[in-house]
Amino acid sequence: MRPELWCDVCCNLSLDIAREAELMPEFNNRHQNSGYRASRLERGYQIECDCQFIKESKSSGCEFCTFLDKVIDTFIPNQTKHGDWMLLCLLEDRTFIYFNPSNPDTIDGRTSFQGVVYIYRPTDSVSEQSRSDYAHIPVLPDIKLPYSKESFDYLKTCLETCAETHGQCKQNPSSPPKRLLHIGVFGDDSARLYETPDDFQEPYVALSYCWGKGNVLKTESSNIQSLMRGFSLEELPAAVRDAAHVTQKLELKYLWVDALCIIQNSKSDWEEQSAKMCSIYEKAYLTIIASSSDAANVSFLNHCARPMTFQYRIPDKPDIILAARAECKNGHHFDSSAGIGNPVVPDPTISRGWTLQESILPTRAISYSTDELQWHCRSIRSCECQSKANDEQVASILAGNSQLDILRQWDKLVRVYTQRQLTYPEDKFPAISGISQLIHRRTGWQYLAGLWKDHLIYQLLWERHSFHPLFEDADTSMPSKYRAPSFSWASVECPIITFTTSLDAAEEDGILYEDARLVDSEILLSGVDPFGRVEPGSSLTMEGRLMQDVELRGPTEDRYATYDVLIGGRELTFEADIQLEAFCFTDSNGVLQRSARRSARNAEQGLVELESGTMVSMFPLGHSRNTDGTGTQYFLFLGASPSNQKAYERLGLLMMGCNPQEGYNWLDFGDVPVQRIMLL
């Protein structure tokens, strides 16, 4: 029931009052032509108005409007007389304001906030009176600093709940890492490198972090014996030392850190241990992710940034506190679709290649994100702010209930992974080897240099993401070192787009058809890991119809590797995987030919104009056809391989839309003989 004293501006921040008041005939007309609009939502109510309107209305004596006025002053210090608007949302499970200031720039060191601000009562200040008179205001915990007792209690509660109640997160101790750091009990400032016996079954913690460029302590053949005898925790870089302290506070004794538990200058030990990443992170009792640290020598426990918060004590009711807090925007709340203009700087670990699998493989993990602590395990995701995670984040591969679900997750993962950076580009496959192992173990699929043999045609339907929102220009340069065959997405430096949606259409509507098939494959491994580095000469043998002698012209623009082709009377623009250049070779008949290949020239030097008569081949991979006769044909563009003129290398993918009613006819290649070709 609506109280006698209620505000017709903010409705006392109560959804029930707003819903009841809306039934009053005079309610919706009370602020006509005033810049104030109120409307019902499916699960709540929203009030949209100029911030100045709230400030002018506080004189009515409404304690809630007085609170909102102070929130406005806190979050929008650079106010204009009119133009700063807010959207107050009263929902069933939360209350928040969305601010959109007209002047978000910094003035006199003060910056206006743009985004969501949550309204709540702090958990540790809820009194008997606030439970009754203010029960409609959500109760949320304040977000404390990472080293605080409250943050550690959050971690401990999540860990104990998971270990004791989550059936999906049960672990069987087996196959321990070859080495661990023995760090002793809390207060002990010494540690030693420890080689685990075969029957070792003690729980251990794993650390995921950014190495950075600093020179930090790591295990090499020259110092391993010294580290096994013992050293001071003070010798560890800050992020590793923090992880040791958290491990000790959890009353655990063992910590796995890659820099110290792998002999860094031993190729054989590095390959052996990096191939076990899946097992190491899966079987860790807990993984600590130092998300806020951009280097090993940066502490995550001493990270002091937290979302802007304002607290207000109700006059004459000092035991009642109302609070406003800016939304957490990092970690599993980060919105990568916001693009280059996104004012949110992502957690450093979000931009690094190795840390992707280190966040997905663990059975359970705690992330020390920029804004808060965030927990995830195979059962749940949670965080200190208690807001929902962004659905666009890469979920655990284990969440897939079918092979199609797993393939969707893999494609999503590859798209995210190709946006990340690696210190050593040749780590492209090793840095996701653990995830590849996990998928192979669950599905039995055969791995072919970043692609899955069982869905190969669809896996070949990838292309360069030229206009990715996080990158002003996709890099069209060739990697400095060989790391993958040309048919693999790992052979390019830029973000890519994958085509699981085409597979979905095929599974659900039966409209996608394969026009080629795999005959044989040979992936030459560089080491012991079947999901790791590969050598030049890795190949696929495909069977299909090869359309030869297609002239390539261009590039059509200075900045992008796009080229023109004339196919079936249609002038089409073809986007290459990376920039191309022409080269000449003598074929098996002794005839001089000119084809195109990927150029080793740096993209910053500008693109090279192809010479007249540069010929390539088209290889139909598949097509989709709709009931109205429209559809799409998918072609690989291939050039003669510079290293083996009897083989081909991928230049890019062409998707050709077909609509006969508008003159865009299907390309008929039925007269082209079927043959076998080798792709390198």
Image: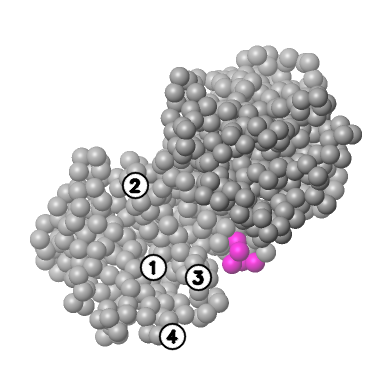
| Left or right for 649, reference 242 | left
Residue drawn at x 52%, y 27% is 77
* Disc 2: which residue: 474
From mark 2 to mark 4, how far is it between C-alphas?
A: 36 Å
Residue drawn at x 63%, y 29% is 70
Q: Quadrant of residue 440?
A: bottom right
From mark 3 to mark 1, how far is it between C-alphas?
A: 22 Å
From mark 3 to mark 2, how far is it between C-alphas?
A: 26 Å
| Residue contact at pointers 3 and 1, CB within 8 angstroms | no
Q: Quadrant of residue 61?
A: top right
Residue 87 percent location from the top left of the image: 58, 45
* Disc 3: which residue: 503
Give the residues in magenta.
402-406
* Disc 4: which residue: 627
In this picture the colour scheme is: one colour
Q: Residues within 10 Å of mark 4 (few under 14, many from 20)?
A: few
From mark 4 to mark 1, how far is it between C-alphas?
A: 33 Å
Give the mark, 3 or 1, whose residue is nearer the N terminus.
Answer: 3
Q: Mark 2: which amino acid?
A: Ala
Q: Mark 3: which amino acid?
A: Leu
Residue 410 percent location from the top left of the image: 55, 57
Residue 541 is tagged as 1
